[in-house]
Image (cartoon, helix red, strand yellow):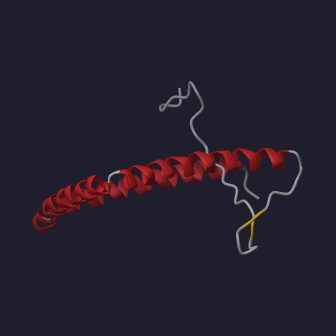
Amino acid sequence: MQNVQEVFNKIREMKKEQKDLRDMYKDALAQADEYEELVEEIATLREKKKQIETRIQAELGRAWEKFDDLKREVETEKEMLNDIALTTLMKGETVEVKDEYDNPYEPAWKVNFKKANGGTTTGK
């Protein structure tokens, strides 16, 4: 089995190659006149869409504000759920919840890596 560092290095190499290919693709798109015209048309349509959404949100008034408040509350509750589940797991206990239909749910754990404080992009 490969170790964490080997897999991490392989992912970094693949991402660099992916970036190079993406840049080549973007350059090729920039050369296509029809593409640029469509991009401009899409930007115009997005702006029109945004204006309509803003108008409808204003018309909904308090209902839209409540929707927005609930959206933020759900995110806060999700963070708390994650913290409680992780704490429960670290205590060696089973983590499981059930919905209103008695369907069991178990956590799906995910690990991300971020650059540690003081890290550099040059590796020096």
- Please identify the quadrant where the N terminus is shown: bottom right
User: In which quarter of the view is residue 46 placed?
Assistant: bottom left
Q: Which of 53/30 is in front?
A: 53
Q: Nearer the viewer, residue 96 or 21?
A: 96
- Extreme residue toward the front, this view: 62
Q: Nearer the viewer, residue 5 or 53?
A: 53
Q: Position of residue 67 (x, y in %)?
A: 44, 54
- Above-or-below relation of 70 to 34: above
Q: Nearer the viewer, residue 72 or 109?
A: 72
User: Which residue is depicted at the point 63% across and 46% down?
Assistant: 79
Residue 27 is situated, as x and y percent measured from the top left of the image, at: 23, 56
Left or right: 57 with respect to 80?
left
Residue at 82%, 50% (x, y): give it: 89
Residue 75: x and y in percent read 55, 49
Number of marks present in the image shown: 0
Q: Choose top left, top right, bottom left or bottom right for residue 103.
A: bottom right
Percent of width and height locating residue 18: 42, 57
Give left or right: position of 5 versus 44: right
Residue lying farthest right?
92
82 displayed left or right of 35: right
Q: Residue at x 67, y 45 (%)?
A: 80
Looking at the image, which residue is at 72% across and 75% down? 101
Q: Quadrant of residue 54?
A: bottom left
